[in-house]
Image: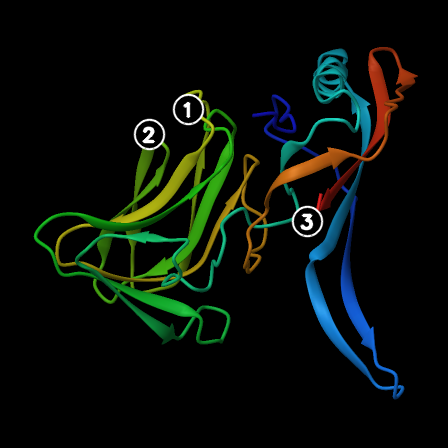
Amino acid sequence: MIVYPQFGTGSMAQFPIRKKQLQRTVVNAALDGSSIRLADSTGASTQWVLRYIALTDAEREILETFFETTEGSLNTFTFLDPTANLLAWSDQLSNSAWQTGPQLTLAAGMADPVGGLLAWKLSNLAAATQGISQTIQAPASYQYCFSSYMRADQSTTVTMTAGGQQAMYRATPSWARVTFPSGGGAAANSINFGIELPAGATVYVYGVQTEAQAGASPYKSSMGGGVYSNARLAHDLLTFTATAPRQHACTVTIINVNHL
C-alpha cells in the first residue's frame, strides 16, 4: 500500500490548505421539456492543494521518493486528509463502521458539551472490560492523535487504545476533552482506535476523532471519514524552489475521483 508521507514532526501538510469538493448531477431531459435530476455520488471528486515552505533536505527527499514511487499521476495511493476526521460516522456510534463489545449498550440523544444532543451514553453491563472501536485502513506506524469529549456521573477510569498502545484517563462529572497521541506502532496497513470501559461503568462521549498529526484540532463531525484510498497526484512534475540554504518550497496537488 502506497501512502502519502508523514514527516518526522508528525505533520503531512502546512497551512493554509486549499480543499475543493465537486459533486455531479445527472440530468435526464424528456421530450416534453421536463427533466429529472439525480445526484451521482460516483462522479464526486475532491482536490487538495498543499503548499510547503521551509522544507528541510530530508523532507524534500521524502516527497521526491514518494513522487518516484507513484510515478507521478500513474499510481493511486492512500491519502489521510489533514483537514478531516479520519474516523467514519463520528456522531453515529451505532453505525456498522464501529465495533462494539457484546455487553456494551449505547444510547443516543444525550446532551453534549456544545449545547446539542449528539453525545452518547455508553454502559458496560458486563463483569469485564467492554469497548467500542473503529479500524481505519492507514499505516499503524504513523503518528496519530485520538481524542474525545467525555464525562461520567461518577468518576471512572477510561482506557483509550490506538493499535497496540493504550493510555488511561479519568472521566469526571464535568465534560473534558481527552487526547491520546500515539505513534511508531507495528508495520501494518490498518490501525484500530477504541474506548474501553471497566466493568459496571457508564460514560458519556462526544466528538470522537482521529487525526494523522501530533495534536488535536477542533472537532469535525464525519460521515465517510477522511481516509481516501484512491488518491492520485494531479501532475507528472514535482518542482522545488530553493528559498534559503537547505530550505525548499513546493506545491503538491492531490485529487480523488470516485469513479476512477
Mark sitting on residue 164: 2
Name which residue lies at 36% across and 58% down: 150
- The three-letter amino acid code for the residue at tag 2 is Gly
Please determine whether, in this image, residue 189 is positioned above or below residue 227.
Answer: above
Query: Do labels 1 and 2 touch, CB within 8 Å?
Result: yes
Query: Residue at the left extreme?
Result: 127
Q: In which quarter of the image is residue 31?
A: bottom right
Report the residue marked by disc 3. 258
Mark sitting on residue 185: 1
For the N terminus, give its image quadrant. Answer: top right
Badge 3 marks a residue whose secondary structure is loop
Within 10 Å of disc 1 (Cα), the crowding (few <14, some 14-19, many 20+) is: some
Q: Earlier in the sequence, mark 1 or mark 3?
A: 1
Is 8 situated left or right of 208 in this image?
right
Q: How many labels does the image show?
A: 3
Query: Do labels 2 and 3 touch, CB within 8 Å?
Result: no
Residue 157, x across and y down, in percent = 23, 49
Name which residue lies at 65% across and 42% down: 82
Q: Earlier in the sequence, mark 1 or mark 2?
A: 2
Residue 171, x across and y down, in percent = 30, 55
Badge 1 marks a residue whose secondary structure is loop
Work out whether residue 1 or residue 15 is closer to the camera in this orientation and state it. Answer: 1
Query: Residue at the front extreme?
Result: 31
Within 10 Å of disc 3 (Cα), the crowding (few <14, some 14-19, many 20+) is: some
Q: Quadrant of residue 256?
A: top right
Residue depth check, mark 2 versus mark 3: number of the one nearer the observer: 3
How far apart are the alpha carbons under marks 1 and 3? 30 Å
Name which residue lies at 58% across and 48% down: 217
- The three-letter amino acid code for the residue at tag 1 is Gly
- The three-letter amino acid code for the residue at tag 3 is Asn
Residue 149, x across and y down, in percent = 42, 57
Badge 2 marks a residue whose secondary structure is loop
